Image (spheres, grey):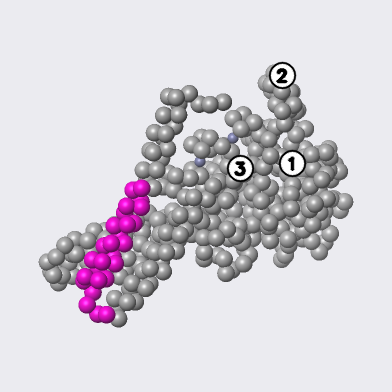
Amino acid sequence: MAPSGSRSIKRSCQTVLYWIPVIFITLIVAWSYYAYVVQLCIESIDNIGQKIVYLLAYHVVFILFTWAYWQTIFTKPMNPLKEFHLSYSDKELLEREDRGESQQEILRRIAKDLPIYTRTMSGAIRFCDRCQLVKPDRCHHCSVCDKCILKMDHHCPWVNNCVGFSNYKFFMLFLAYSLLYCIFITATDLQYFIKFWTNGLPDTQAKFHIMFLFFAASMFSVSLASLFVYHCWLVCKNRSTLEAVRAPAFRHGADKNGFSLGLSKNFRQVFGDEMRYWPFPVYSSLGDGCSFPTCLVNQDPEQPTSPGHNPPPNKTVVGESHQFPAKPLRESQSRLLNSAPSWTENGGAEDKERRGTSNPAMAIENET
Ligand SMILES: [Zn+2]
Ligand SMILES: [Zn+2]
């Protein structure tokens, strides 16, 4: 359906408004580049060796920072796969039913074939009315993007994008490198900032750039540091910002540590298991964003624990006793899951064919 004229104008105005914070940040960064490179390094530093070292180090940090920022802004958030969307007949069925239990009955039938472990606080299947889909675990509807976003963390106005499964690593690196950028500027600008107050600088316009650069960089350092530390804590705990505010609810109730697999694996879920990719804003997160391993195998009746459903003993996660649930959705790109092949090896091509009809393992699980 084509949007009406006034609605499309409103949408265009909103689009422009949403970009204002990004333009604001870009202008500040562009000015900081000019102030540091031209006014501080080229105009004010006399020692040629110091000039070269400062400029080289600055550009390394600057490139990493702008690269991570670019990736956070322009990586499209991932939306639930088509398996989670209601089919035409299911939509009709759902519309025909009155609200409440009968609708839940339909949703429960659909959710049976999906790797879903979380529920609403009242124990119902999480359903997005707007997108007409059963929400995957950790997925939330973003009112700004007007879409369901996989492992949604928050909608960030400073990047005009949803931070979620597809770009959380980039967002973390953006925080880390922007903090490093500010700390580097503050540290190297400090002696010239002191000279400014002791009248040690020549009376040119450079001295004002040097002063404002120090103020801006040190103030941004403080706010970025607190945000970065908070998100490091979230990564260690395997929680999104939304989950930190409200713990995800499972069959047995809310559990704020439901997705935590231990420090190392929590970190690898976001950054991947190849160390050489960790520092760079290239995609290396593990998993498919629709299904997440949980540590609740012994508490959640939905999670398979009997030998029939367990992966063979050698297929447990390396170094830990947790076993991933055996509800495969699709062959994931995940290397983490390769160490728990119940999702990948069993969940490969064979399973893709079975999906949508019936999966015996799933059927048995859902009888509980
Ligand atoms: Zn939605
Ligand atoms: Zn959003």
Percent across and percent down for residue 132 are 64, 31
The amino acid type, in three-letter code, at marker 2 is Arg
Label 1 crowd bin: few (<14), some (14–19), many (20+), radius 10 Å: many
Percent across and percent down for residue 366 are 81, 39
Circle number at residue 114? 1
Asked if residue 24 is among those painted magenta in the image, a careful observer would answer: yes
Q: Residue at x 44, y 64 (%)?
A: 64
Q: Residue at x 39, y 48 (%)?
A: 22
For marks 3 and 2 on the same chain, the one whose residue lies earlier in the sequence: 3
Magenta range is: 23-48
Q: Secondary structure at mark 2?
A: helix
Front position among marks 3 and 1: 3
Return the residue at label 3. 79
| Image quadrant occupied by the C terminus | top right
| Image quadrant occupied by the N terminus | top right
Q: Secondary structure at mark 3?
A: loop
Tell me the CA gap for discs 2 and 1: 23 Å
- Main SS, magenta region, reads helix
Label 2 crowd bin: few (<14), some (14–19), many (20+), radius 10 Å: few
The amino acid type, in three-letter code, at marker 1 is Leu
Residue labelled 3 has its Cβ within 8 Å of some atom of ligand 1: no
Circle number at residue 96? 2
